Image (tube, grey):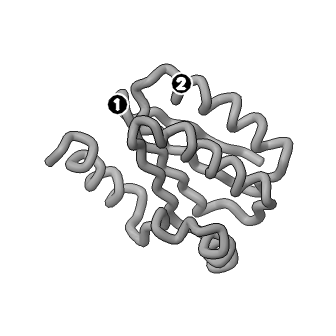
């Protein structure tokens, strides 16, 4: 599993997942993201799953856990580019409202307005 975490401005983190997301890799990602959320400025997590080929239940837990951490500040979770199989898994987990069809670039363009109230 290779992942990339990019902080965009003060309020947005993009997490690009690649390969396989299992229990071990979720711990690494969680340890990297949680401190950024807890510092208080992050309002949006964008999960780009374009290059993710496999995810077990710990991946769902990773996303849901970060959603819970963002809830007190009305933070937003965005999931882009899930495979058809992952899309079904997200639907069963009740995460359909968080799946967007736009590309990462289009989402980032929209987020400028969403985050800054435009």
Q: Is residue 110 left or right of residue 62?
A: left
The numbered mark, 1 or 2, whose residue comes first in the sequence reads 1
Given contact means CB atoms under 8 Å apart, are the residues at marks 1 and 2 in contact? Answer: no
Instruction: Place residue 73 in its image quadrant.
Output: top left
Q: Is residue 59 left or right of residue 11?
A: right
Instruction: Place residue 19 in its image quadrant.
Output: bottom right
Secondary structure type for disc 1: loop
Q: Residue at x 20, y 49 (%)?
A: 113
Q: Choose mark 1 or mark 2, whichever is in front.
A: 2
User: Mark 2 sits on what residue?
Assistant: 38
Q: Residues within 10 Å of mark 1 (few under 14, many from 20)?
A: few
Q: Residue at x 62, y 51 (%)?
A: 64
Position of 12 relative to 82 (above/below) = above
Of the pair 15 and 44, the residue shown nearer to us? 44
Q: Residues within 10 Å of mark 2 (few under 14, many from 20)?
A: few
The image position of residue 80, as x and y in percent, is 50, 62
Residue extending farthest left: 118
Disc 1/disc 2 C-alpha distance (Å): 16 Å
User: Mark 1 sits on what residue?
Assistant: 9
Position of 43 relative to 105 (above/below) = above
The image position of residue 23, as x and y in percent, is 84, 47
Q: Is residue 28 left or right of residue 67?
A: right
Residue extending farthest top: 39
Secondary structure type for disc 2: helix
Residue extending farthest right: 24
């Amino acid at each position: 599993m290779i992942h990339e975490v990019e902080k965009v401005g003060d309020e947005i983190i993009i997490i690009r997942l690649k390969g396989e997301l299992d229990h071990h890799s979720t711990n690494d990602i969680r340890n990297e993201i949680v401190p950024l959320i807890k510092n208080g400025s992050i309002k949006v997590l964008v999960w780009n799953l374009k290059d993710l080929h496999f995810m077990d239940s710990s991946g769902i837990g990773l996303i849901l856990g970060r959603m819970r951490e963002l809830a007190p500040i009305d933070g937003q979770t965005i999931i882009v580019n899930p495979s058809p199989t992952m899309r079904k898994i997200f639907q069963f987990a009740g995460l359909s409202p968080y799946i967007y069809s736009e590309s990462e670039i289009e989402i980032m363009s929209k987020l400028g307005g969403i985050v800054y109230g435009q």
